[in-house]
Image: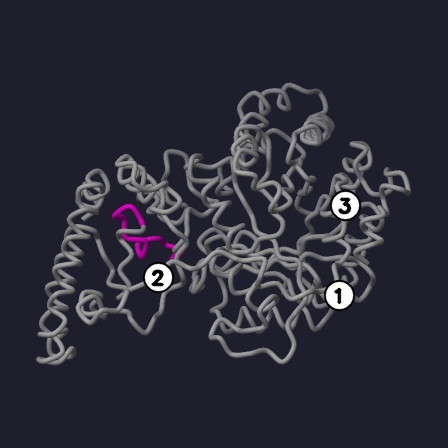
């Protein structure tokens, strides 16, 4: 099966043309199908379609065939059920985060898409458009019968339009992102406790120093206090949280309920991400959900905020007011598709972007060069992830065991050769922040380091980018006052 799947990608251009012809021929059978009855025809057609698609494409019969929009690689083989991949955890060589023996489906989709694009008729972004989440009612149903009945099996989701926007008051992070100054956010993991004091004590170290504090949502597949509750606690105590919401653990009903709940509790910022796989966490026996991916979640969140509707189309009594972000990983393969994935997220409505740890300045510069070429940095504020660990051994472990993290060997050698590895790692992080501040299109930094708040606060202060380091006229810009 895997060999034939790879063969279909290698011959994507020819198969795509053949597939288009087959769809047009099948559509001609519509009058006959109506006469016989769609249910009777499907009973005969389904086994034939299943056998053919399984053999050639390793198809799992989602009932909404999108092969012509995914480079002839069936996306239902993605372990995270992503419809707009790749995720941020692709391994070296383009292998799957969850199933390391398998090449990432979306790496293959990119390969197939480029072969189709070689014909020159359409750009890659149109050959691999943003797709809606799966309609699970169609599972194990024939998509051919839909074509015969004149119904599209799936339609690409429309890009977010500024015409959709409902006016909302801007929160402090949104004002900071539009002020033109260098933004600083920091990441804090929720506690393993029902007592909020530990969270508040750690978060308080950044009071007046950063623009917002990200609260992770089961990072690494590990269980902690819920992100929405921890974010609400920070809000109550005068801090500005970014509520991270991952698709891994909730279906679209639960996610939308949590978004409304967060907004009702005063949270003003959310970060939409697909989420790490459960296999690497402390509950590997748990069932991952992945009903949505980050692109779908972004579109749903923007629909709630800016059109005042649920994903179902049902009206909300009052729309939430949220500044909505997404993630990007310029440091994991496939590098060429990372910009396309970023563009999909911005098209879906992302207003700010936070990246994975940046330890490789060249990869980031390449990514930003292409982002500027497409003017993506003007449509969403790009905040680059930075961080530190206490030793070269710890950094090496993270690069090996945390999907999507890339640490160059020269940096590992530099830290390993230092008399004080912790101080050298801290120094390297400060140098990275200062270098990033000089790159056009980088709007700020997102500082990360698990339960390392004291050092992170020192890094922000010593790098000279914290809010307390800014002159008053910059810390509270006229634009911020105007928006407020």
Dot placed on the residue nearer the N-terminal end, 2 or 1? 2
Dot placed on the residue nearer the N-terminal end, 2 or 3? 2
Q: Residue 376, position in %: x, y?
A: 56, 42
Of the two numbered discs 2 and 1 in the rendering, the one whose residue sits closer to the viewer: 2
- Residue sitting at x 75%, y 65%: 233
**Residue 373 on the magenta segment:** no
Q: Which residue is mark 3?
A: 179
- Residue sitting at x 66%, y 46%: 450
Q: Which mark is residue 233?
A: 1
Are circles 2 and 3 on residues that touch, CB within 8 Å?
no
Q: Secondary structure at mark 1?
A: helix
Mark 1 crowdedness (10 Å alpha carbons): few <14, some 14-19, many ≥20: many
Q: Residue 171, position in %: x, y?
A: 75, 59
Occupied quadrant, residue 292: bottom left
Q: Which residues are magenta?
A: 70-81
**Residue 76 on the magenta segment:** yes
Of the two numbered discs 1 and 3 in the rendering, the one whose residue sits closer to the viewer: 3
Occupied quadrant, residue 133: bottom left
Q: Secondary structure at mark 3?
A: loop
Establish if 253 lies above or below 395: below
Q: Which residue is mark 2?
A: 155
């Amino acid at each position: 099966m895997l060999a034939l799947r790879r063969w279909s990608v290698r011959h994507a251009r020819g198969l795509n043309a053949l597939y288009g012809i087959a769809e047009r021929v099948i559509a001609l059978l519509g009058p006959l199908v109506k006469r016989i009855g769609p249910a009777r025809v499907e009973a005969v057609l389904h086994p034939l379609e299943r056998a053919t698609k399984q053999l050639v494409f390793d198809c799992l019969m989602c009932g909404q065939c999108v092969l012509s929009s995914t480079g002839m690689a069936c996306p239902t083989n993605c372990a995270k059920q992503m419809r707009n991949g790749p995720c941020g955890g692709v391994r070296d060589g383009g292998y799957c985060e969850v199933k390391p023996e398998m090449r990432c489906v979306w790496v293959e989709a990119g390969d197939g898409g480029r072969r189709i694009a070689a014909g020159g008729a359409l750009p890659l972004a149109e050959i691999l458009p943003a797709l809606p989440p799966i309609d699970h009612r169609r599972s194990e149903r024939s998509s051919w019968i839909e074509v015969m009945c004149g119904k599209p099996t799936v339609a690409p989701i429309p890009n977010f339009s500024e015409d959709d926007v409902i006016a909302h008051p801007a929160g402090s992070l949104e004002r900071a992102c539009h002020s033109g100054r260098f933004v600083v956010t920091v990441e804090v993991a929720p506690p393993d406790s029902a007592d909020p004091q530990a969270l508040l004590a750690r978060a308080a170290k950044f009071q007046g120093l950063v623009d917002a504090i990200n609260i992770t949502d089961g990072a690494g597949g590990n269980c902690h206090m819920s992100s929405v509750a921890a974010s609400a606690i920070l809000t109550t105590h005068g801090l500005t949280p970014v509520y991270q919401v991952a698709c891994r653990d909730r279906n679209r009903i639960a996610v939308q309920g949590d978004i409304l709940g967060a907004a009702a509790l005063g949270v003003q910022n959310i970060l939409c991400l697909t989420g790490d796989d459960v296999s690497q966490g402390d509950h590997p026996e748990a069932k991952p959900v992945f009903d949505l991916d980050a692109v779908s979640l972004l579109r749903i969140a923007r629909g709630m905020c800016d059109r005042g509707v649920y994903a179902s189309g049902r009206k909300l009594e009052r729309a939430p007011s949220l500044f909505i972000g997404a993630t990007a990983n310029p440091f994991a393969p496939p590098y060429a598709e990372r910009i396309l994935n970023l563009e999909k997220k911005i098209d879906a409505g992302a207003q700010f972007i936070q990246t994975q740890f940046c330890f490789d300045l060249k990869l980031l510069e390449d990514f930003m060069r292409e982002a500027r070429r497409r003017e993506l940095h003007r449509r969403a504020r790009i905040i680059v992830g930075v961080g530190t660990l206490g030793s070269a051994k710890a950094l090496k472990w993270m690069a090996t065991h945390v999907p999507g993290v890339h640490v160059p060997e020269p940096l590992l050698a530099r830290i390993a050769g230092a008399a004080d590895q912790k101080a050298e790692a801290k120094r390297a992080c400060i140098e990275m922040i200062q270098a990033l501040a000089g790159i056009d299109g980088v709007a700020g930094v997102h500082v990360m380091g698990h339960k390392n708040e004291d050092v992170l606060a020192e890094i922000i202060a010593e790098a000279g980018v914290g809010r307390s380091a800014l002159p008053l006229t910059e810390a509270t810009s006229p634009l911020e006052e105007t928006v407020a």
